[in-house]
Image (cartoon, rainbow, N blue to C red):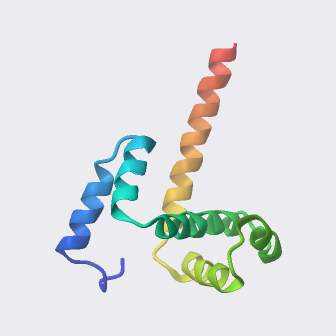
Amino acid sequence: MNSKIKDDSVDFLFQAVLSLKTPEECYAFFEDLCTVPEIKAMSQRLLVAHMLSTKQNYQHIVHITHASTATISRVNRSLNYGCDGYKLVFDRLDKKAEENDKKETKNDQ
C-alpha cells in the first residue's frame, strides 16, 4: 500500500466506493464524482492493465485502446512493481466469470 495517499479523506472515498452495489450505482456515483475524461482515463488504464496481464503486445494494445505507449509503460510498471491491486481485481473478476460460466452450464443441462 502506498502510504503517500493514505488519509481520512481517501479512506472515506474508498468506503463510498465499497458501498456501491450495482453498475448503475457506480455510473451515478462516478459521473457525479469525476469528469468524463477522468472516468475514461481510469477505464482505459484498467483495460491496458488487463491486456498486459494477458501478455498482449504494445502495438495491439495501442490499436485497441488508443492509449499512448507512455501510458502503457506506466501501467506496465504498476503491474510489475506496484501493490498488486490490478492482480487482485483481475483474479476476482476471473473467479466470478468462472462461477457464472458454471451456473450457465448447469442451467443449460
In the image, what residue occupies the spot 70% across and 67% down? 65
Q: Nearer the viewer, residue 66 or 107?
A: 66
Q: Is residue 34 above or below residue 97?
A: below
Residue lying at the far left of the rendered structure: 8
Asked which quadrant contains residue 57, the reply is bottom right
Say which quadrant the N terminus sits in.
bottom left
Left or right, 22 with reference to 40? left
Relative placement, left or right, of 17 versus 22 is: left
Where is residue 56, by image quadrant? bottom right
Numbered disc total: 0
Q: Residue at x 77, y 76 (%)?
A: 58
Instruction: Identify which residue is drawn at 51% across, 69% down.
Output: 37
For the C terminus, which image quadrant? top right
Of 67 and 48, nearer the camera is 67
Q: Where does the image place residue 67, in percent across and percent down from the top left?
A: 68, 75
Q: Where's residue 28, x and y in %?
A: 37, 49
Of the pair 102 and 43, the residue shown nearer to us: 43
